[in-house]
C-alpha cells in the first residue's frame, strides 16, 4: 500500500515540473515578494532517504546505513517576515542493515544479515527562514512525533536461507525527536514552486522494549532528500495608511 502512494506522489511532482519546465522566463510580478504576500503553502514531497540506528555497542559495531524513502503532504503558514511555520503528515521508512556473528544471546555462532525496517506515520512541526528572490533558499528546524505502524526483519543466513519476521511488539509505538534541514525552491510561471531539500530527523526516544545484551539504547536517524511541489494561497492585503483629513480653510 505504501509503495503506490509513494509512486503517485512522485508522478504528481513529475507532471507539474514537466508542464512548467518549458517556460523560459517568469513574469516580473512573480518573485519572492509575491510569495511573501501569500498566507499559506500546501504541497507534497517525496524522496529517497538514508537511515541508521544508533545508541548501543552492537549497533555501532555491526550496523550499516539502509536506503529507504519518505513521502508526505505539508501545510505552512507564512508570517509577515521571512519565517514560516509548517506541519504535515508523512510516512517515513526507517531502519538499518547489520551483519554479525552473534545470536541474540551474544554467542558467536555464524554470520547472518538482518535487514530491519520500521514504518512510521509522523507529524512534524517546523520553523523555516526563507531568503532570496526568484530562486529561494531556506533553513529550518523543529520537532517531530511519529507512530510505529509496521516493523519487519529480513534475515539472510548461510546456505541461502532467507526468511522474514515481525517484531513490532519489541519496539515502542511512539518515536519523537529533532528536525534540521535546508534547501532551495524555484518559482514557476503560475506562481507555484518546485524545490529540493534535505531533512534530518534524529530520534530522541529509546524505541526498544527489549533488553540489549550490549547495553545502551536504540534510536533512529533518517536523512531524506525531498523533491517538493508547492501551491501558494491566500494573498495578503497590503497595508495602506489613510491620509489625515485636510484642515478646514480659514473663514474669510
Image (spheres, rainbow, N blue to C red):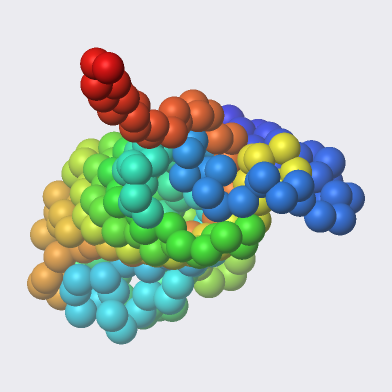
211 relative to 138 in the view: left or right: left
Residue 58 point in image, percent of width and height: 25, 76
207 relative to 52 in the view: left or right: left
The N terminus: image quadrant: top right
Q: How many marks?
A: 0
Residue 48 point in image, percent of width and height: 57, 58
134 relative to 93 in the view: left or right: right
Foreground residue among 91 and 98: 91
Res 239 seen here: yes
Q: Which residue lies furthest to the front in this view?
A: 252
Residue 181 point in image, percent of width and height: 40, 64
Residue at the image point whose x is 53% and y is 43% from the top: 35
Q: Quadrant of residue 205?
A: bottom left
37 relative to 170 in the view: left or right: right
Foreground residue among 191 and 45: 191
Residue 109 point in image, percent of width and height: 34, 78
Q: Is residue 203 above or below residue 230?
A: below
Q: Is residue 110 above or below residue 125?
A: below
Amino acid at each position: 500500500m505504501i509503495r503506490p502512494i509513494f509512486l503517485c506522489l512522485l508522478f504528481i511532482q513529475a507532471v507539474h515540473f514537466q508542464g512548467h519546465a518549458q517556460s523560459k522566463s517568469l513574469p516580473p510580478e512573480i518573485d519572492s515578494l509575491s510569495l511573501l504576500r501569500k498566507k499559506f503553502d500546501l504541497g507534497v514531497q517525496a524522496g529517497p532517504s538514508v537511515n541508521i540506528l544508533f545508541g548501543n555497542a552492537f549497533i555501532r559495531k555491526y550496523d550499516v546505513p539502509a536506503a529507504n524513502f519518505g513521502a508526505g503532504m505539508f501545510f505552512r503558514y507564512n508570517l509577515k517576515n521571512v519565517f514560516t511555520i509548517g506541519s504535515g503528515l508523512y510516512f517515513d521508512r526507517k531502519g538499518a542493515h547489520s551483519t554479525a556473528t552473534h545470536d541474540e544471546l551474544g554467542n558467536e555462532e555464524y554470520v547472518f544479515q538482518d535487514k530491519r525496517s520500521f514504518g512510521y506515520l509522523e507529524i512534524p512541526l517546523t520553523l523555516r527562514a526563507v531568503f532570496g528572490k526568484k530562486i529561494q533558499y531556506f533553513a529550518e528546524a523543529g520537532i517531530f512525533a511519529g507512530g510505529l505502524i509496521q516493523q519487519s526483519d529480513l534475515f539472510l543466513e548461510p546456505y541461502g536461507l532467507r526468511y522474514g519476521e515481525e517484531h513490532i511488539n519489541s519496539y515502542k509505538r511512539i518515536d519523537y525527536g529533532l528536525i534540521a534541514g535546508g534547501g532551495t525552491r524555484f518559482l514557476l510561471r503560475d506562481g507555484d514552486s518546485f524545490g529540493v531539500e534535505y531533512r534530518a530527523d534524529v530520534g530522541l526516544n529509546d524505541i526498544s522494549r527489549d533488553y540489549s545484551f550490549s547495553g545502551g539504547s536504540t534510536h533512529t536517524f533518517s536523512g531524506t532528500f525531498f523533491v517538493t511541489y508547492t501551491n501558494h494561497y491566500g494573498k495578503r492585503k497590503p497595508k495602506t495608511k489613510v491620509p489625515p483629513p485636510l484642515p478646514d480653510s480659514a473663514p474669510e
